[in-house]
């Protein structure tokens, strides 16, 4: 039986109990001298890393609210709390400490109060609702009540209104049926939508603004006279290309009455109003019939008219934009090979100019009224923190230390490597070698394949699981194969219905190069990846016997069957140029199960039992095939988990299980 992994807090409590039972605690250890050996990156470090999201500026640009998600190993959960950065002094304060999630902060115009979403009720029927908090001190208080969950809230710039998204009330008869376990589900029947509501910030009767559409990403115009939001007829991932951007006017100005909803007729994504209220910008595609295309930066007049493509001549994807205070320039972070640079483009059109190189992985920028720019950034040896630049053209500085201490550990060194693929195209990837490893020596190597695949890549951000493997003596190779972002549009779009072919040759030629250069031990190679990386890992074991071990995490193996099982159909039909009954040979050609009789690699298979993207039967099919072929295989599946594991104890088991598997077969 596998050894049990204790959560960090439980292990610490257990150690403390033993110390108390044995007598007085021992004297603290002496401080480490300058020559002391740094500690290794451990499972506890991996499990307790915090992540940062939902950056929101106050109107005056002096405060930045954000959400920190921190794993709670004692409760086996991930908890979200609100934090605050005060400028210019740079003071960082944790605002909430509640065992349930707090998220979605939005400032009052004066900047002294936050509205946010929280579930602080008791009982099984407690719902997420709007809460308020004074930044002068005191406990948060509930803003009204609701019979269904609220998912986001936005305070109008003039302070008069709160717009929010609330799930529709479930019909009483349906609620009664479900209590009696008449809880059947009819596919594609929609009983509740997340709808847009508005209410006076001083209290009053809420007013519903939308019906029978899925609404999210609500944003007020700077003059508080209009609300813009993303809308979809279903909200399903398969209907992503049906997403639109809608605007509802508040009529007359300053009242809660509203006019008719107007849609822009675009494939919308998270957007931003210009500070002067005249424009709306977003990054996305333009053809609803294409499920893989370059993402462009678009700007449209808030009054109507055709949107303009500002990055048509830019050979990379545009990302979520931010406006300059003068409404004349748009900024976004652009993938450039394995790094990230700040890009800028004039609102009226012109060349895209590239600014500071973050030498890291950087998230979407948010710009304050005074021109300050904030973003979340992680580096090869530094996990995610909030960064701020006094203006867009500056490199910025780190403002938080939520993951402090990681940089002091004995971390593996990461560098970019390039090689030539089978067709003569230059390919790049990252190579993470264990701390203290010789600059040139053949090491046992794990090949880590990324998900996506389109526009995804490995960048110079913090890679926690590779660092964990590096701490146990493994080199980790992360190739940016064909379809990766950061290498131009043609590289990303690649040939359709070519899963497992040129992308795999890019990977294989990279492994060949590492062996030829004397960096990888050809007799001790392993491969793993999740999602598309899981698919490509399953493909690998059917194409070569060079790997001593493999791990397939949420990887598809039977693509025709996947069409009927998954929540994503239209994208794959576009990719394979027809439905499975129209182009069956293309679907079978790229399915690992087609070649499974050639598999000989010991394989660990991992899946979340509630994964809708790559459902459980795909993993089960791979496991049963390998067992019947006599190939060593292990199958671990995790209750309640979706596409990627979230619960800390499940993540602990997955990570240690993978390490044991590779240690067993790659000795």
Image (cartoon, rainbow, N blue to C red):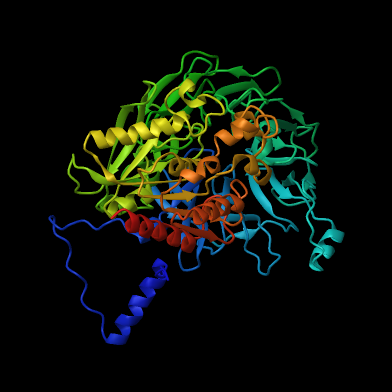
Pick the front one: 207 or 147: 147
Q: Position of residue 387 (x, y in %)?
A: 39, 40
Q: Quadrant of residue 421?
A: top left
Above or below: residue 477 compared with residue 620: above
Q: Is residue 500 left or right of residue 572?
A: left
> 629 or 262, which is in the foreground?
629
Measured along the vertical axis of the image, is residue 462 above or below residue 308? below
Q: Residue 632 at what x, y percent from top left? A: 43, 56
Please identify the quadrant where the N terminus is shown: bottom left
Asked whether, in this view, residue 172 is left or right of residue 544, the answer is: right
Residue in the picture at 46% in, 48% down: 52
Residue 264 on image: x %, y % = 71, 25
Quadrant in the picture for residue 225 = top right
Q: Residue at x 64, y 39 (%)?
A: 560
Using the image, determine if residue 344 lies above or below residue 518.
above
Q: Is residue 31 left or right of residue 189?
A: left
Q: Locate the C terminus and report the quarter of the image it occupies.
A: bottom left
Residue at the outermost top position = 350
Q: Is residue 491 visible?
A: yes
Please tell me how many numbered marks the rendered image carries: 0
* Percent position of residue 244, x then y: 69, 31
Residue 137 showing in the rendered view: no
Which residue: 30% across, 54% down? 405
Along the line of sight, the residue nearer the viewer: 370 or 328: 328
Task: In the displayed orientation, state which residue is furthest to the right.
Answer: 173
Q: Residue at x 70, y 34 (%)?
A: 581
């Amino acid at each position: 039986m596998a050894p049990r992994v204790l959560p960090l807090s439980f292990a610490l409590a257990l150690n403390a109990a033993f110390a108390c039972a044995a007598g007085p605690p021992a004297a603290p250890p002496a401080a480490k001298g300058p020559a002391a050996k740094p500690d290794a990156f451990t499972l506890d470090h991996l499990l307790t890393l915090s992540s940062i999201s939902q950056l929101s500026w106050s109107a005056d640009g002096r405060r930045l609210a954000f959400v920190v998600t921190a794993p709670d190993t004692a409760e086996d959960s991930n908890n979200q709390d609100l934090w605050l950065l005060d400028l210019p002094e740079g003071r960082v304060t944790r605002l909430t400490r509640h065992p349930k999630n707090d998220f979605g902060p939005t400032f009052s115009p004066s900047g002294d109060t936050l509205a946010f979403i929280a579930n602080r009720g008791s009982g099984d029927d407690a719902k997420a609702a709007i809460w308020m908090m004074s930044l002068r001190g005191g406990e948060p208080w509930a803003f009204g009540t609701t019979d269904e969950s609220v998912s986001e809230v936005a305070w109008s710039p003039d302070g008069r209104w709160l717009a929010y998204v609330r799930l529709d009330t479930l019909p009483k008869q349906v609620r009664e049926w479900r209590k009696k376990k008449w809880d059947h589900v009819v596919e594609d029947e929609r009983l509740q939508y997340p709808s847009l509501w508005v209410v006076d910030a001083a209290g009053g009767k809420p007013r519903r603004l939308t019906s029978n559409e899925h609404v999210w990403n609500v944003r007020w115009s700077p003059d508080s006279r209009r609300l813009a939001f993303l809308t979809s007829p279903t909200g399903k991932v398969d209907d992503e290309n049906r997403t639109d951007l809608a605007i509802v006017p508040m009529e007359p100005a300053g009242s809660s009455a509203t006019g008719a909803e107007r849609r822009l007729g675009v494939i919308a994504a998270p957007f931003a109003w210009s500070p002067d209220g005249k424009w709306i910008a977003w990054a996305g595609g333009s053809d609803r019939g294409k499920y893989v295309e370059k993402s462009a930066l678009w700007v449209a007049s808030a009054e109507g008219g055709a949107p303009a493509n500002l990055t048509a001549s830019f050979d990379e994807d545009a990302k979520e934009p931010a406006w300059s205070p003068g409404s004349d320039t748009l900024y976004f972070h652009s993938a450039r090979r394995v790094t990230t640079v700040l890009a800028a483009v004039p609102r009226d059109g012109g060349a895209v100019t590239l600014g500071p190189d973050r030498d890291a992985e950087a998230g979407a920028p948010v710009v304050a009224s005074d021109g300050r720019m904030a973003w979340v950034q992680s580096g090869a040896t530094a996990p995610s923190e909030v960064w701020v630049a006094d203006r867009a053209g500056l490199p910025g500085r780190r403002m938080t230390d939520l993951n402090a201490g990681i940089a002091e550990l004995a971390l593996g060194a990461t560098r970019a490597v390039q090689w030539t693929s089978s067709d003569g195209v230059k390919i790049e990837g990252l190579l993470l070698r264990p701390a203290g490893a010789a600059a040139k020596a053949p090491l046992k190597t794990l090949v880590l394949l990324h998900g996506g695949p389109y526009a995804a890549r490995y960048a110079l951000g913090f890679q926690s699981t590779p660092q964990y493997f590096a701490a146990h003596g493994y080199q980790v190779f992360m190739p940016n194969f064909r379809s990766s972002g950061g290498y131009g549009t043609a590289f990303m779009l690649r040939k359709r219905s070519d899963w497992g072919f040129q992308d795999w040759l890019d990977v294989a030629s990279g492994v060949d190069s590492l062996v030829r250069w004397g960096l990888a031990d050809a007799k001790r190679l392993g491969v793993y990846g999740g999602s598309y990386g899981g698919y490509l890992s399953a493909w690998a074991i059917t194409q070569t016997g060079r790997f001593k071990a493999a791990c397939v995490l949420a990887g598809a193996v039977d693509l025709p069957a996947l069409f009927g099982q998954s929540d994503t159909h239209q994208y794959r039909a576009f990719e394979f140029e027809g439905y499975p009954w129209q182009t069956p040979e293309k679907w079978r050609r790229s399915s690992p199960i087609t070649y499974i009789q050639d598999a000989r690699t010991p394989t660990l298979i991992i899946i979340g039992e509630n994964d809708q993207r790559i459902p459980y039967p795909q993993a089960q099919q791979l496991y049963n095939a390998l067992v019947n072929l006599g190939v060593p295989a292990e199958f671990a599946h995790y209750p309640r988990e979706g596409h990627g594991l979230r619960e800390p104890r499940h993540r602990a088991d997955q990570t240690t299980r993978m390490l044991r598997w590779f240690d067993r077969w790659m000795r």
